[in-house]
Image (cartoon, rainbow, N blue to C red):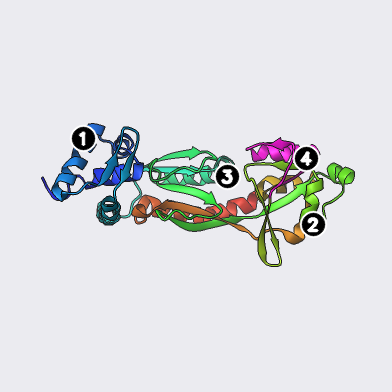
Amino acid sequence: MTRWEGIDEFVAVANAGGFTRGANLIGMSPTHVSRAVMALERRLDTQLFHRTTRTVRLTDAGRGFLERCERIVQERDEAFALVGQKGEPHGELRVTCSTAMGERFVAPILRRFAMQHPRLSLTIELTNRVIDMVAEDFDLAIRTGSTNDPRLVAVPVASRTLHTCAAPDYLSRRGRPDQIGALASHECIIGTAATWQFKIDGREFLYRPAGRFHCNSGHAVIEACIDGMGVCQLPDFYIFPFLKRGMVELVLEEVQAPDEPIWAVYPQRRHLLPKLQHAIEALKNELAAAMNRRN
């Protein structure tokens, strides 16, 4: 037995929040992982987890030990990656992204990237659910908005603009809102965002819209808007094709929120893996241009 044994298993269980999920992360059996962690605890003469029939939680000693073990595992993996891969992306790259942005932009970019690197396999999960990247073993996520998980690193790769709009027919019937408060007297079409973003006197202002139509699909929201059902706020790539054809009109442009960054987000321990570095570079080079072309 070496001093390394049990560390990978311990880190996996701690990040996944359970022995079975931790075992799945590293491709080992739950029995092996449980025994390895117990052996590690005996060597340390310290309990690393509080265990019940339903939960597994780190002890105070376990939390401190995890921080150091994660750094050790990260540096070891990076050393192997840099020497063994010689800078060439290979292995499996697991990516998650919101459905609409993924279908339109991210999946085509990463598909071309994978075609350029035959030793790389690519898995993309498109969902509007915010995935726990560490627990579910994803390498990369494309996200918007704030990123405040200390386990993750966020790199800006593009940006998008949120626009508020309505159909000309709706505006002729109900009038054009001239200030944010006027939205209270309008029908609002609500998508995945519970609040709409604006900027007043240089400061962010969040408005909670109310309306009869709610849907987690941007396509359905813009179609309802075109049909004259009300006012909506969506990213530019939903709105601009219909704006050019006069099917919607922008409103409240004077309080439009500043551009929202789009981030490539990844777990800290993977930041030097060639497959990740090259994928992020491809997104930096292509995503903004692809979104601008679509607009």
The disc label shown at residue 179, or none? 2
Determine the secondary structure under disc 1.
Answer: helix
Say whether marks 4 and 3 touch (CB < 8 Å): no
**Residue 51 in the image: above or below residue 66:** above
Q: Which residue is drawn at 34% across and 37% down?
A: 55
**Is disc 2 surrounded by few (<14), some (14 to 19) or many (20+) residues within 10 Å?**
few
Q: Which of marks 3 and 1 is nearer the N terminus?
A: 1
* Quadrant in the picture for residue 21: top left
Residue 111 visible from this viewpoint: no
Left-right relation of 126 to 153? right
Front residue of this view, candidates 292 and 116: 292
**Contact check, label 3 and label 1, Cβ < 8 Å:** no
Kind of residue indicated by mark 3: Met
Q: In this rendering, does residue 25 appear at all?
A: yes
Query: Which one is in front, 199 or 39?
Result: 39
Query: Which of the 4 image quadrants contains residue 224?
Result: top right
Task: Pinpoint residue 190: horizontal percent, then vertical percent.
Answer: 69, 42
Q: Quick one: SS at disc 3? A: helix
The residue to which callout 1 is attached is 32
Q: Where is residue 74 in the image (x, y as percent from the top left)?
A: 29, 54
* Comes first in the chain, label 1 or label 2: 1
What secondary structure is marked by label 2?
loop
Q: What residue type is labelled 1?
A: His
- Observer-side mark, 4 or 2, equals 2
Q: Do the residues labelled 1 and 2 touch (CB within 8 Å)?
A: no
* Three-letter code for the amino acid on which mark 2 is drawn: Gln
Provide the residue designation for mark 4: 226
